[in-house]
Image (cartoon, rainbow, N blue to C red):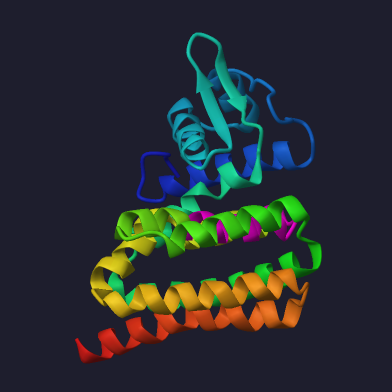
Amino acid sequence: MAEDSPASGSVTQRAIGQIKAMIADGRLGPGQRLPTERELAVRLGISRSSMREAIRALTVLGVLESRHGSGIYVTSLETGELLETFGMVAEISPASRLAELLEVRRILEASATAMAAARIGEEELAEVERWLKAMDGADDPEEFLVADMAFHRTIAQAAGNEALAAIVEGLSSRTFRARIRRGEQDAAAFARARTEHGRIYRSLCARDPEAARTAAAAHVGAVEEWLRAQLDAG
């Protein structure tokens, strides 16, 4: 079958799979330069155009990077970088999908907060308190949102699981959260959020994972419940 046929996408997918396999089994490591496009195409038995598409796709995903005048390299493969596209899904999803994403965030953030309660250090706890106070003193919604994001980011990082923290960050992305806040248009929501954040902070201070899990789930669940009600009303 010719590569320019309707099924040519499968050739590119095969090339992507083979490059990923080379990375997974250690033939290509983080920071290592790939063979040239021509060499890879010959080695894998596909056209250069399909190889070029495969490299472009893996570059978008953060697996590969192009260095001008030097070639194509494997990135550092840091979890946060690889999961950046996950955050984009949350940002561009239609309103009907936001409730589902909030449900996922509620489950994962509750777990991350419980883990943080068992592992958080004094410096991280002090940073959580700093962002809590910043939210308490914020009058501007934008200022509140910045502190809110930092509050949750600090807790997720304190959980000690880089992959989990990156996913939670993606689901809590600035644009995603701002879309919900702008749509809510409820001044009382900020007062409720301050109370909910206070419960989360106290559970961390108490080093109580189950209380932390419950407080975090209730916090995200309140927004999820509101959004579902809006979708049902619409």
**Residue 156 versus residue 24: which sits nearer the camera?**
156
Residue at the far front in the pictured view: 137
Q: Quadrant of the C terminus?
A: bottom left
Percent coordinates x, y for residue 151 in the rendering? 54, 59
Q: Quadrant of the N terminus?
A: top left
One can see residue 107 in this view: no
Is 233 magenta? The answer is: no
Q: Is residue 84 above or below residue 204?
A: above
Q: Residue at x 54, y 19 (%)?
A: 38
Q: Residue at x 55, y 16 (%)?
A: 71
**Residue 104 versus residue 133: which sits nearer the camera?**
133
Task: Report the label total.
Answer: 0
Please identify the quarter of the rendering in which residue 129 is found: bottom right
Percent coordinates x, y for residue 187 in the rendering? 28, 75
Residue at the far top in the pictured view: 69
Percent coordinates x, y for residue 220 in the rendering? 49, 77
Left or right of residue 110: residue 220 = left
Q: Is residue 188 above or below residue 115?
A: below
Q: Which residues are magenta?
A: 148-163
Percent coordinates x, y for residue 52 in the rendering? 46, 29
Q: Residue at x 74, y 30 (%)?
A: 29
**Residue 17 versus residue 130: which sits nearer the camera?**
130
